[in-house]
Amino acid sequence: MGKTRKIATSLLAASMVFSLAACSGGKNSESASPSPSDSAKPSESASAAASTAPSANADEPGWKSDTSPITFDWYLNFSWFPNKWGVDPTSQYVTKKTGVNINFIVPAGNENEKLNTMLASGKLPDFITLGWWEDAVKKMIEGKMVLPLNELAKEYDPYFFKVADTAKMGWYTQPDGNVYGYPNSSASAEDYKKYGENFTSNQTFEVRKDMWEAIGKPDMSTPEGFLNALKLAKEKFPTVDGQPLIPIGLHEFGETGNTSLEGYLQNFLAIPQEKDGKLYDRSTDPEYIKWLKVFRQANQDGLLAKDIFIDKRAQMEEKIAQGRYFAMLYQRTDFANQNISLYQKDPNKAYIAIDGPKNSNGDQPTLAGPSISGWTVTLISKDVKDKKRAIEFLSYLISEEGNKDLYLGEKGFSYDTIDGKDQFKPEALELLNKDRSAFDKQFGSSFTFWMMQDTNMILQWAPPSVEPSKQLEDWTKGKSVSMSQFDNIAPTGNSDEGVANSKMAQLWGKALPKLLMAKSDADFDKIWSKYQEDIKAAGKDKVDAYKQKAYEENVKKLGAGK
């Protein structure tokens, strides 16, 4: 139950990088990009035929040796991704520079269905980008459907080893000694030493500023204060522009639970993930169970709107943009664009971060900061149309040059050297701070295309944060910690442990709504006991043993990388 940490990695100076997700959430984008034009195909064939000899110089970017036109199909496992390559000036600039065009393939609906269909077909697009925690990563590697990046680099582009981070390569090295995926938004122990004071978390508890102030700025960190504030808000603001107020918003409910009410809430309660070197099952902690019962009580009191059980991200963003939530336990970057719109209309109606649920001691939360696992990993298919051009392009994207191109764009257009520093031109920065969607189309920089973004590297070019994002980011400073040692410890795939873990997640997904809708705490306890029996029968003990071993290996791996 720690899905939140997997996606909750962000930096103070890179918050706008992720706001693209907020501005595009739920807008399904089908892979309607045209196929490579007929006129391009002869050049692409020639390019493929030429891709045989490795780069002669490991210090020189391999991509510079061949910039003839080629189009790669790139699968992004995020249905909300709205952008197409080649529409904006930045991607056009990269294509003109490298010769590489991208045809994005994005699921129109359920990501897992699309991904599973592709895996079952046995044929994958050239590049695949998905969350590092996805079961499909292991399936692709075990099924030999993707190529080792290190082997591709040795054969075709040794420059890759110059630009790849050794700690991240070490982290993603598989038992066979190969590396198949490279992360974005990743932070190593060395990064924490170098940039740690700027690291923030996505995890925030927010309230609509005007409403919170109108009911007296109540403390919502205790069960009593939390419930009372929701009640006061509903009484004072029963409707918002004729629509019912939603007292508390959460991430969407899915087959395996709700991010907000799992690791996210446990982090706010500062519940440890290990004790004396042994993993601790945070879901059994009395503080956590107490707060789940607080949400149960909220439902009994009519403070959990039906919307939160059925709305997906698109509906939630629409309602956030209308200011219909009083409070939210919701990742700040996932609604950044909506909050900017609210702030532009009236700063008092925007959402701000305040202290959310706390444990009985009132301890500060321990929020998920950037981790070495990052956010997504990108892999290269065994069916890739041109191995040499593919690894060369990946090397370019993870290099400082590639990061600068995709973050700042083309010099003289979206950025320039101003006061001795390479930075966004005023007109680009103004639009970036006002309307991310429009910025993506007009400029296409600031990681509109975030697949290989290095959120540490871009600190040298990043502008200072502005409101309303700044307040939310600043609130997380000093509360964000690295949780890398707990990444990627859950069993996946078709092993006994993987199947058991999947079954347990499904059981939790069914139990959680029942717990919240329980008529009393006594009924909650019965449902909880039944859930504990069910996961025990599903194989919890062997899953726990697997996780413990994986955790110990992670600790060793991180220690070796220091």
Image (spheres, grey):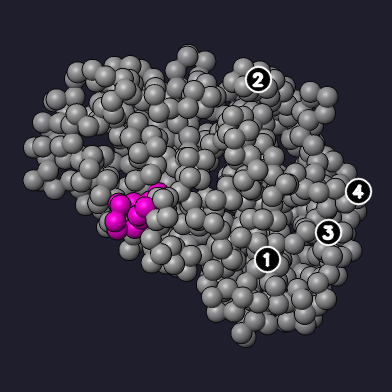
- Residue lying at the far bottom of the rendered structure: 242
Relative to residue 352, is residue 4 depicted above or below?
above
- Under mark 1, the amino acid is Ile
Q: Which mark is residue 361?
A: 4
Q: CA distance from mark 4 to mark 3?
A: 11 Å
Q: Nearer the viewer, residue 109 or 249?
A: 249
Which type of secondary structure does the marked residue at label 3 adopt? loop
Q: Is residue 404 left or right of residue 465?
A: left
Please tell me whether mark 3 or mark 2 is closer to you in this view: 2
Location of the N terminus (image quadrant): top right
Q: Residue at x 73, y 26 (%)?
A: 544
Judging by the rendered image, the residue that carries numbered circle 2 is 559
Residue at numbered disc 3: 221
Q: How far, Cα to Cα, is label 3 from label 2?
A: 36 Å
Residue 109 in the image: above or below residue 182: below
Q: Secondary structure at mark 2?
A: helix
Q: Amino acid at mark 3?
A: Ser
- Say which mark, if any, is on residue 352: 1
Question: Mark 3 touching mark 2, by CB under 8 A?
Answer: no
Residue at image location 72% in from the left, 82% down from the top? 238
Say few, some or many: other residues with alpha carbon within 10 Å of mark 4 (under 14 / 14 to 19 / 20 or more). few
Q: Quadrant of residue 451?
A: top left
Q: Is residue 414 a member of the stretch shown in magenta? A: yes
**Do residues under tags 4 and 1 come within 8 Å of each other at their CB atoms?**
no
Amino acid tagged 4 = Asn
Q: Which residues are magenta?
A: 407-417
Residue 494 image offset from top left, x and y in percent:
54, 26
Q: Residue at x 22, y 43 (%)?
A: 97
Find residue 286 and report its horizontal and vertical position in percent: 88, 44
Q: Residue furthest front?
A: 419
Nearest to the observer: residue 228 or residue 141: 228
C-alpha distance separating marks 3 and 1: 15 Å
